[in-house]
Structures are given as C-alpha cells and as structure tokens.
Image (tube, rainbow, N blue to C red):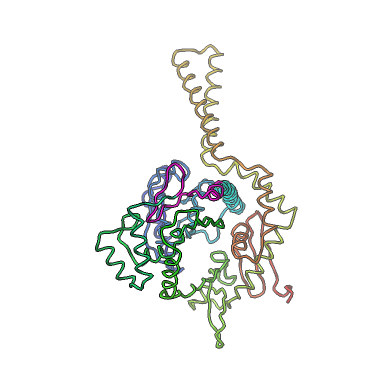
Amino acid sequence: MNAVIYARFSSDRQREASIEGQIRECTEYAKRNDITVVGSYIDRALSASKDTEKRLDFLKMINDSGKGLFDTVLVWKLDRFARDRYDSAHYKHILKKNGVKVVSATEGITSGPEGIILEAMLEGMAEYYSAELSEKIRRGQKENALKGMNNGSTAPLGYVLNGSTKKLDIEPAEAPVVLEIFKRYAEGEDLKKLRDDLNARGLTTKKGFPFTYTTLAAMLKNRKYIGEYKYGDIVIPGGIPAIVPQDIFDRARERLTKNQKTPAAAKADERYLLTTKLFCGKCGAQMVGESGKSRTGKMYHYYKCLSAKRKTGCDKKAVKKDWIEDLVVNQTMAVVMNDRLMERIADRLLAIQGAESYDLKLMGRELSEVEKGIDNLLNAIQAGIFSQSTQKRLTELESCKEQLEKAILTEKLKRPALDREEISFFLHRFRNIDVTVPEQRQRLIDCFINAVYVYDDKIVLVFNYKNGTKTVKLNELGG
C-alpha cells in the first residue's frame, strides 16, 4: 500500500512546528501498518474550509491521485482534510473514483458518526443527479447514432468528420494507406516489418505518432473500415463509406486472431469489505485481509489481527472473511429495515446539516456582531448622540450587513440543504440493495458501519449514529 501525507496548519491557531508533528505521527502510523509513504503535500497558514482554491498542494494532490502513484491519503486528523462536509464529500468522491481513500493517523475510527452517513448521502445524491444527466446525454447520443452521426469519437485514419452532416467521410490522402496496410497483412506480411516500413516512409497515425504494433492491431480489428457504424448496441451496416473490401478485412482479421496470443484472464483481487473498520477486541489493533491455500489447493480468505500477525503479544485467532462480512451486512440491514431507527437518523441528519458549513457559521457570527453594532448606533442617535463619524460608521455597518446577507444567501445556494423527503429517499434506497453484490455490500458498510470489534465470544458493532452500538453474542448465533 502506497500513501501520501497531507498536512496543513492555520496561522490563527497553530505554528509551523505543527506541520512536523502531523508528518511525524502520520509516518509512525504508516510504519505500524506496513504502509509505504511515497510523498507529502503541505499547505501552510490556510483554512480547510475557506479559499479551497488557494490550497495549492491540496488541489495538486487531488489531481495527482488519478496517476496511480498512491492509494491512500494519510492525515493527522480528518479536519486537516476538510472541515466542511460538502467539500469533504466532493473531494473524497474524486479520490474514491481514482481508487484512493483518506485515513486518519490519530483517530482509530472515523469521527462524527452521523456525518459519515450525511457524507455518503451527499455522494449518493451527486451520483444520482450525475446518472440522470448521463441518461439525458445518452438519449441524445442514441438519437445521433440512429442517424449514423458521429458521437464525439476521433475519426480513425482514413476518415474525416464532415462538419455539416456530423458523419464520417473518406480522407483521400489517408484512405490508400489504410487499404495498403490491410492488403499487405492479409497477404502474409509480418506486422513488425509492415510497421517498420510505414515509419521509415514517414507515415504516421491520425494523431501524428509513429505506427506501433498496438496501433496496427487496433486498425485491423476496426469494422468501420468495412463501412459498419456502431455505437453501443446500435449497428448500421453501410452507415460509413467503406475503405476496405469485406474479403480482405476478413482475411486480415482471421490472420491477426491466429497470431495473437490470448492473454490470461486477470486474476481478480479479493475484496475485503471491512478494511480499516475491523478491530481486534483483545488488543485493539486493526484486523487485515489475508489469504492462504490448503493442502488440497483450496483458497481461504480471512481477517487477522496485525499484532497477532507480527507476534507482538496478541493471540487472537483469525476470522473467516465471508462469515464476518455476512454477519456485519445482515446486522446492518436490520438497522436499515427498522422504521423508528431510520426516522431517528433522518431527524439527526436534518439537524446537523446547518452545523456542517463552517463558512456559514463564521458569516452568521459576523452578521450578528454587525447587527449589534447597528443597534448600538441607532440607540445612540435616538439618545441625541450624532456626528459625521457616527453617520459614517452606520453607513459602513449597513453596507457590511448587506454584503454578509448576500454572501450567506450565495453560500446556501451553493450548498443546498437536503430536505427530509430527500434524506428519507436516500436512506430507504438501502432497503432495496442486492446484498450479494460486492459493490452494494461495500456501500452499505461504508455508510452505516463505523467500526467492528471482534472478541472470542462476541462481536461489537459501532454504527454511524449516536449511541449506535450493538453487541452480538456468538453463542446466540444460529448455525
């Protein structure tokens, strides 16, 4: 596991030395958990909730997360990442799409229980509206496809996009090269020799790059060259002007299929749904995913206490992966199906939304102070105390009040609060999930489970709502 450290300090409450402390604790956490730190991103004297666009290293980290260089962002505490739940949800969503998670080095389990559900809900709503937008786009693209129009893909070598019809036309200068490639390969010429000859003549791909084995192989599979238009499940024979005759295309494709080795099926990595949430009840250490083979070659998957694994004092036995994950999922679904509990969670989420925007809190306090100042001045004027400076100060405060009211309104419009109906809609969607699908199981766990502690005689589940702890006695479980 590769990680980067993100550290930040605010000039109003912290010193430069706090950066060193944050990095030290993150580094120590990485060592304890076999995590390799590959870099760090540091923002100095900046708030987590204000002027996010000025947190240059933070934004660079978000951008770099798509390069596959790291899979974890380590922070000293979660408030170093963001204080505003909306910003946190937004940027965590980007990281999640890039396969990166945020981990706190000092908070053994994620803080702010209902906040986790709110965060998941905001992400879910964003995905819902994104999917709705995507559906509209797909409908438009399907209409284009039925007319044989290009849907934004780059025209392949030999074709050019007609700006008027939005369809592909033959490019006279490139089409002969395409036909030559198919003919020479269909007649038995080696692909490497063909590639070298094309490059020696100064010919290039559509993007101006030299030909490679990969680009030539892709061309020989492209059915556009026999006039076939395809978009999704829409196929229109003759929808594009053909460059290569059918018999030459078939011979070239058949030869390519025989010559290419079928790649071995990639072995899917086993997904451990309780990673970072499962803890040893004996020593408190995290339990991590492990696998092993029996003498018969059968593969087993389980979770093991890190301390027991390293033989540093704990003797907790490993637990079977499928067993503990099924138990957690079933117990969580019992929460989801509890009407009274879901109503209580909805009430709590509705209440904490207003407390989640750090900026709104600050502006609200400023507005209150300004209004007090205006009231004091008006009282002074009524008492007969009036001067040019009094009038000037009153004008300044009234102007400040107007600006703050506009800023608060803008902030509320930027981050609309979800109403009770939207919250209930999101929470009740979990009742219809397919608990046999790993992705849906993972979403259920991420949203509702804060931590799970495994003892020899019981399992303690900590849910993401106030007083949300449940103990399951192992001797009471059936089977």
- Magenta segment, prevailing SS (helix, strand or loop): loop
Please give left or right for residue 304 compared with residue 257 in the image: right
Residue appearing at x 70%, y 71% in the figure: 473
The image position of residue 433, as x and y in percent, is 67, 59
Examine the rendering and report whether any part of residue 85 can be seen.
no
| Quadrant that contains the C terminus | bottom right
Please give left or right for residue 379 compared with residue 70 in the image: right
The image position of residue 289, as x and y in percent, is 53, 72
Please give left or right for residue 185 compared with residue 90 in the image: left
Residue appearing at x 47%, y 15% in the figure: 391
Examine the rendering and report whether any part of residue 463 can be seen.
yes
The image position of residue 185, as x and y in percent, is 36, 69
Frontmost residue, 273 versus 143: 143
Report the magenta residues as a range. Answer: 140-167
Residue appearing at x 65%, y 54% in the figure: 465
Residue 306 magenta-drawn? no
Frontmost residue, 103 versus 248: 248
| Quadrant that contains the N terminus | bottom left
